[in-house]
Structure formats: structure tokens, C-alpha cells
Amino acid sequence: QAAAQTFLMKAFVVAIFLMAIILVTQFNSFYSAFLILSAVIMSTVGVMLGLLVTNQPFGIVMSGIGVIALAGIVVNNNIVLIDTYDRLKTVSATPLEAILRTGAQRLRPVMLTTVTTILGLMPMVLGVNLDFTTREVLVGAPSTQWWTQLSTAIAFGLTFATVLTLVVTPSALMLQA
């Protein structure tokens, strides 16, 4: 476990560093890159809350992989939002108008990503196994226990991160303007 923890921490730090380099070159702004990456870090609070609510331990391997997978989704949602804002602020009269138009245009894609991902993960979060050969629905089957921490980390983290994306990110963009 110690070796897995060390590896996953290094992988997470390298992934964040590479994302930061790509985001700075993409947006030509340290602030936008910092805003996106801070959402990734803050989304881990949602992971911890989800594991507390479901009374699961933080498994180094599966929860850690869930946090890394969650980072990709959170980055994508924030990139979509900030890119749209950057495009709209050039044609809008005020930064507030650009933020409001960005929120209106990007609410649906962010919510669709979140809802479909969470609904797709719910059988694993709840420990439900569908056996198509015998046509049985099993709850708590041994095959589901392996994936429960990973899916719980992603589902709860994404729920928390979506609130961050739709509320905190536009607020932070307004502070920049």
C-alpha cells in the first residue's frame, strides 16, 4: 500500500503539472490555469465527503484512481466554461454579461456530463450487479465490492465539483475582471 500510495501521489502531481503547462499555453493566462486546477484540488473535498457519507475508508488504490479520473472530468468542465467566457468577453459589453451568457450557454453541457456520469456510476456506487445470463439482480456481489470506492469517489467528487464549476468558477472570473 505504501508503494501504491507513493506511485499515485507522484502520478497525481505529474498529471497536475502537465495539465498546468498545457492550460497556461492554451489560455495564455496563469489565472485561468490556476482557476481550473484549484477546482481539481477542491473537488477532492467532495470525494472525502462522499466516502464519509457512505461510511467507506479511503482506499489508496481505488479512491486514488477515482480522484485522478475525476480530475479529467473537472478540468474538461472548467475548460469549456472558461473558454466560452474568454470568447464572449470580447463581444459583450461588460464582464458580468459575458459571465451570465457563459453560464446560460454552458449549463446544459456541464450538467449533461455530470448527470450521465453519475447515473452511469450509480449501480457500482450502490453495489448492484446485473447478471445477464441468469437474469438476476444481485446487491453486494463480490464483483461490485472492488469498484465501489472508485465509483463513489468519482460520483460524489463530480457532484461537488459541478457546484464549484457552476458557482465558484464564474465568481472567480468576475473577480478577475
Image (cartoon, helix red, strand yellow):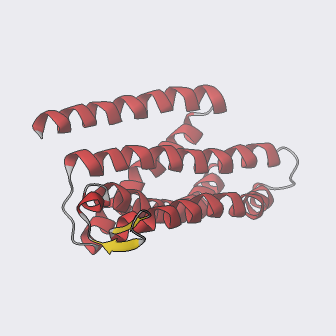
Q: Position of residue 107 (x, y in %)?
A: 69, 63
Quadrant housing the N terminus? top left
Rendered residue at 57%/66% (across/down): 115
Tell me the quarter of the picture where residue 26 sits.
top right
Q: Position of residue 88 (x, y in %)?
A: 81, 48
| Residue 35 in sight in this render | no
User: Which residue is nearer to you in this view: 62 or 128?
Assistant: 128
Q: Position of residue 134 (x, y in %)?
A: 39, 68
User: Which residue is nearer to you in this view: 111 or 33?
Assistant: 111
Tell me the quarter of the picture where residue 108 sits.
bottom right
**Residue farthest toward the front in the current orientation of the protein:** 134
Rendered residue at 25%/61% (across/down): 145
Q: Position of residue 14 (x, y in %)?
A: 36, 28
Q: How many discs mark residues in the rendered view?
A: 0
Q: Is residue 41 above or below residue 122?
A: above
Rendered residue at 39%/49% (across/down): 41
| Residue 4 in sight in this render | yes
